Amino acid sequence: MKNPLQPGAWPSPLSAQLLAQAGSALMWSQPMGDDVWWDEVRPHQAGRTAIVSRQQGDILNAPWSARSQVHEYGGISWLGLIRQGQQMLAFVNKDDQRIYITAPKGEPRALSPQAPPGQSHRYIDMISVGDEIWCIRERHEEGRVSRDLVAISDAGFRSLEASSHFYAHPRLSPDGRHLSWIAWEHPQMPWDGTEVRVADVHDGKLSNVRALAGGLQESCLCPEWGPGNVLYYICDKSGWWNLWQVNLQGQQSHVIDEASEWGFPLWQLGMRAITVLEDGQIISVHGPVAARKIVRVDPVKRSMQELGSDLTEFKPSISAGRGKAYAVGASGSVISQLLEIDVATWKISAVISSIGAPVDVAYFPTPHEIKALRSDGREVFAILHPAHHPDLEPSEKPPLMVVVHGGPTANSSATLSMKYAYFTSRGISVVDVNYGGSTGYGRAYRNLLQGQWGIVDREDVLAVVDALIAQGTCDKDKVLIRGGSAGGFTVLNVLVNSQRFAAGASYYGVADCSALAADTHDFESRYLDAMIGAYPQEKALYQERSPLTHVARLSSPLILFQGLEDKVVPPSQSEAFRDACAAKGLKHAYIAYAGEGHGFRQAATIVSSLEAELKFYGEVLGFVPHL
C-alpha cells in the first residue's frame, strides 16, 4: 500500500543535478563504411555537441563543439568525408562558425575563409561533391542577412546560387548532373510555403534553376533523389504532410495518401524525414503524434510496412547505408535511443547508443494523449503526464502544471521527459497542450493560429485546464503554467487574461509583440505576419496581443528565466515584464544566465532554473520541495 503525502513535497531520487548529467541528446547520424557516426549534445560539457564513432568513441576533441548558428537554431553541423582514402570530419565550430576539418581525434584546421571585418559568416547542411563541400552560407553584414549555396575546398571558395533568401536540404543527384534544394522567401515560413528547386550541374556550376513542386500554399520538405533522377519529398498539398514524387519534367505523383503526418516543422536545417535505399525503397516516419512509426515504402507498388518497435516517436534524422538504416527514437519509457535497422529483415538489429535513465523507471509516469472539447465543439489535444511515485500517493488532489510548447509551430509527444518526471515524481501532474497551430494534426489544425496567435492558443490551454478540473484530475486552486519562447508568450498572455492559475514560469518568453517584430532575428522576422498581421501596418493589433500591454491585470506570482545571449527573444522582453511585476509589488523572480541563448544547454543552468522554479511553486502553494 502506498503512503499518502502532500503533493509537491514527495521525496524523489531524480535531482536536478542527476537530470542535467543525464540530459545528453542524440540527433543526427551518418554511416561511414562499416562504422556509424552520430552527435550528442552534452550539458555536462558546457552544452557542447560532440561527434561519436561506434568504433572509435569520441572523434571530435573537447572543447571543440559542432554547432551552427544559422537561423539561430542550427541543425546538422557536421559531415563525415573520405579524403584520399582516409576518414575525415568536417564540422561548423560553435565559437567562430567557420567550417573546420580533422581526422578522427585529430587537431582541426579551418577550411572556410575568415569573414571580412564587421561580418559574420555561418554554414550548415553540408554535402560532399568531389573535392569540395557544398552547403548553405548565411552572411550577416551591417544588419542585413543573406544566404546562398556555396562550394568550399582547399583550392578556394565559390558561390553557386544566390537567388533565394532561404535555402534548405541541398542534394546532388546520383549521376552528378542535378542539384535539388528547398527555397522560400519572406514572409513565408517553411511550414507555410516552399518550393522544390533543381538546377543542372556542369563543371561544378549551376544553371537552368527551376521549381518542380511547391508554392506559397504548399509546404514541401526533404527532397531526396531516387533511381532515374526521380525526387521524393514530403508535401502537404493534400492537407497532410505525405510522401510525393516528381520527375525532372515537373510531373508530380502522390505516393502515399493518408490522413497522417510524414513531415516535421523545419526549425533545424538538415532535417531528414525520408531516406532512399539503394534498391529504391524509402524509409520515413509517419503516424499520429502519440504513436509515430518508422515505415518502409515501395514507391512502385505504393505499399508500406511499419517497423516493429515499442518506440512511439522518431526524430527526422534517418540515415542509411550498406544494408542498414539508423534512426533516433523514444517512448513513454525510453528517453532516447539510436537504433540500427537491418533493411533486409526489416528488424531492429542493435541499439547503438542510449540515453539511460538516472533513476529507476518505476518513478516515471505513463504519458498519454488526451482530448478536451472547446465550447465551440472543436477538439484540443494534449499529453498528460500524471503525478506518479512507486511508494507514495497524494494526500489531496495534486497540483497541475500546464506546459505550453514553443514554436508555436511545433508539438509535444507522448514520450518520457526527464524534466516533467522531475515534477511528476514529486507529486505534480503535468499536461502538455498541443493547442491549435501545433504540428502533427494536419495543415488545417496547423493553420488555426493564422491571425489568431494570442487567442486560439490561450483558449485551447484554458479548455484543457477546465476539462481536467471538471474530471477531478487536479486541485482547481493549484494550477501552474510554464512555457518557453512562444510558449512563454502564451503563459504571459494566459496569466493576464485569466484568474485560474496559482503561479507561472516563463522561459525567455515574448512579452511585447511589437518589440519581437522589430528585434528578433531574420528567420522569424516575418513569422508574425501570418499569426497576427503585417507590421507596422497592424501595430495596434500587435499592442493589443502583447501581454505587456495588459500587465496591470496580472495577479498570479511569476518567475522569469532568460539567457543573456538570446538573439531570438532578447532579454529586454523578460526585463520589461520583471519591471512591471516590481512596479505592481507582485511576487516574482527574475533569473538571467550569462552564456546562454535561446534554450538552455549548460548543466549548471538547467540545475539552477529547475530548482528555482520548484522552490517558487512551493512558496506559492505551501509545500516544502524535496530537492
Image (cartoon, rainbow, N blue to C red):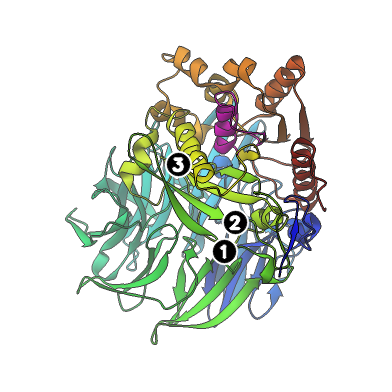
User: In the displayed structure, does residue 533 sit left or right of residue 301?
Assistant: right
Residue 107 in percent (x, y) is at 74, 64
Residue at the spot 65% in from the left edge and 54% down from the top edge: 420
Mark 1 in CB contact with mark 3 (< 8 angstroms): no
Which label lies toward us, 3 or 2?
2
How crowded pointer 3 is (Cα within 10 Å; few <14, some 14-19, many 20+) is rated as many
Residue 286 in percent (x, y) is at 37, 63
**Which one is in front, 69 or 347?**
347
Mark 2 in CB contact with mark 1 (< 8 angstroms): yes
> What residue occupies the far bottom of the structure in this picture?
345
How crowded pointer 2 is (Cα within 10 Å; few <14, some 14-19, many 20+) is rated as many
Cα distance, mark 1 to mark 3? 21 Å
Residue at the spot 16% in from the left edge and 55% down from the top edge: 251
Identify the mark nearer the N-term, 2 or 1.
1
Identify the mark nearer the N-term, 3 or 2.
2
Asked where in the image residue 567 lies, by quadrant, the reply is: top right
Question: For the residue marked with disc 1, what is the amino acid?
Answer: Thr
Asked where in the image residue 59 lies, by quadrant, the reply is: bottom right
Name the element at disc 2.
loop
Name the element at disc 3.
loop
Give the number of marks.
3
Q: Identify the disc placed on residue 295.
A: none
- Whether residue 63 is in magenta: the answer is no
Q: Which residues are magenta?
A: 484-508
Q: Which residue is mark 2?
A: 386
Q: Identify the disc placed on residue 366.
A: 1
Q: Which residue is mark 3?
A: 435
